[in-house]
Image: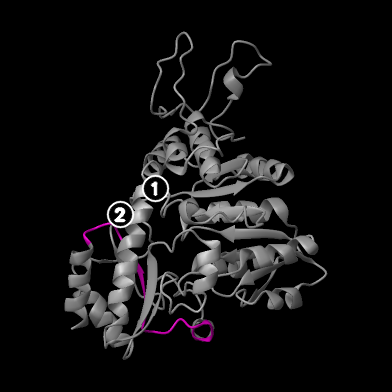
């Protein structure tokens, strides 16, 4: 349980979960040690030392990360997993039963859709997809067996926004669980729990880790009953984050505030540049007044993040030629690292989504997603300019 909500974001990012231990025999570590031990000795049979028994159940380094994440997301409880999809799977396993119905945003990360459609569907879970930018569609989609609503805001890769507060009013009135994937904005730019969500999930591989060198996932919440169920399954299933990966994620978190500020500054500059290019059909970025939900972004988010998408004129071959000419941007999946990444969703992150479904929600063959890094923005613009020309 975290008690750090009153401190500033950067203070929590640096200090939460890592208070020096001044007790006799301790070392006063300013940085949490990497506790690699898989088991913990006890003096008495009935008293685990410090509450630690086996590292899958609880590990001091992972606990420090979970405490820090909860503080940053303004949650009471935090749980760290071996990947974002492991975190998502644990939420579903913990809170749903076969035959339960899920309502999900139709513009979700392809891996989440694959999880719903090709894994959990085999065990009796049902999923319906809606355009969650329109809350009235949510009300119409509720069935007698509906138990959970799953949204991303902003979405991947079309950066659509869901009115989290409006949706939460519907889910609470109907006794449904609302899960919000907050990966794209991180806890720095958005707090879904404050807007009424029950559970927040992250791929901590992205902005939280921030350096493209550690895989992880997280679940943050304040509901004690849900937490107890999730913690039981975290231990029982065992998809926990390792001590070393917990340490790397902690190290990345300490610079989250300054990184997110630079990500956003660069992204907005690039989005404005792209809007002026004759070869670009449209630019999608919540920080632009041209975004159809610009006013919602200003109400719900404290910033617009570092991800933008744009659509090129022409066909897929034009898009592939453009991408292959870039030299500063890396043509790669994932996002949220200090380096700038760029990709073609139709052929990469969303290739597992059927072409008819992609086209229906607006993912064309020339839609390009950009994770803007923290390099010098002039170098990024020059790289885009030469490839566009």
Per the rendered image, the range of residues in magenta is: 359-376
* Horizontal side of residue 2 vs 147, given as left or right: left
User: How is colour applied across the structure in the image?
Assistant: one colour
Q: Position of residue 164 (x, y in %)?
A: 62, 64
Residue at coordinates 70% horizontally, 65% vertically from top-left?
Answer: 125
Between residues 7 and 106, which one lies in front from this camera angle? 7
Q: Please report whichever mark, 2 or 1, sits nearer to the chain's N-terminal start.
A: 1
Residue depicted at 64% across the width and 41% down the height = 231
Query: Where residue 216 sits: x, y (%)?
Result: 46, 49
Foreground residue, 264 or 78?
Answer: 264
> Distance between the Cα atoms at labels 2 and 1?
10 Å
Q: Is residue 385 visible?
A: yes
The residue at which mark 2 appears reads as: 338
* Vertical side of 375 occupied by 71: above or below: above
- Asked if residue 366 lies in the magenta stretch, the reply is yes
Of the residues tagged 2 and 1, which is closer to the observer?
Answer: 1
Residue 82 sits inside the magenta stretch: no
Which corner quadrant holds the N terminus? top right
* Circle 1 residue: 256
Q: In the figure, is residue 309 to the left or right of 358?
A: left
Q: Is label 1 in a helix, a strand or a loop?
A: helix
Name the quadrant containing residue 238.
top right
Would you identify the image quadrant in which residue 43 lies?
A: top right
Say if 194 sits above or below 369 in the image.
Answer: above
Q: Position of residue 302 (x, y in %)?
A: 48, 58
Neighbourhood count class around disc 1 (C-alpha, 10 Å): few under 14, some 14–19, many 20 upward? many
């Amino acid at each position: 349980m975290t008690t750090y909500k009153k401190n500033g974001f950067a203070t929590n990012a640096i200090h939460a979960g890592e208070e020096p231990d001044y007790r006799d025999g301790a070392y006063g570590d300013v940085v949490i040690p990497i506790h690699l031990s898989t088991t913990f000795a006890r003096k008495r049979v009935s008293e685990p030392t410090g509450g630690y028994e086996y590292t899958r159940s609880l590990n001091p380094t992972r606990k420090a990360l979970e405490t820090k994440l909860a503080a940053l997301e303004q949650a009471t409880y935090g749980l760290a997993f071996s990947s974002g999809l492991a975190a998502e799977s644990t939420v579903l396993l913990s809170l749903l039963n076969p035959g339960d119905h899920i309502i999900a945003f139709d513009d979700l990360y392809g891996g989440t859709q694959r999880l719903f459609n090709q894994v959990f569907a085999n065990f009796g879970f049902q999923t319906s997809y809606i355009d969650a930018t329109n809350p009235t569609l949510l009300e119409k989609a509720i069935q007698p067996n509906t138990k959970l609503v799953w949204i991303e805001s902003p979405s991947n890769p079309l950066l659509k926004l869901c009115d989290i507060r409006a949706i939460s009013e519907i889910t609470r009135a109907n006794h449904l669980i609302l899960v919000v994937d907050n990966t794209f904005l991180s806890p720095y730019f958005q707090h879904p729990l404050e807007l009424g969500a029950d559970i927040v999930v992250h791929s901590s591989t992205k902005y939280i880790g921030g350096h493209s060198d550690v895989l992880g996932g997280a679940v943050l919440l304040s509901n004690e009953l849900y937490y107890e169920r999730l913690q039981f399954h975290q231990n029982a299933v065992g998809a926990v984050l390792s001590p070393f990966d917990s340490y790397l994620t902690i190290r990345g978190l300490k610079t989250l505030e300054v990184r997110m500020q630079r990500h956003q500054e660069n992204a907005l500059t690039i989005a404005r540049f792209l809007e002026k290019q004759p070869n670009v059909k449209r630019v999608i970025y919540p920080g632009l007044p041209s975004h159809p939900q610009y006013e919602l972004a200003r109400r719900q988010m404290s910033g617009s993040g570092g991800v933008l998408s744009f659509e090129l004129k022409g066909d897929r071959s034009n898009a592939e030629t453009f991408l292959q000419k870039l030299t500063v941007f890396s043509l790669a999946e994932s996002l949220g690292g200090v380096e700038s990444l760029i990709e073609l969703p139709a052929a990469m992150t969303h290739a597992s989504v059927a072409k008819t479904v992609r086209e229906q929600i607006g993912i064309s063959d020339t839609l390009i997603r950009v994770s803007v890094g923290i390099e010098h923005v002039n170098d990024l613009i020059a790289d885009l300019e030469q490839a566009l020309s």
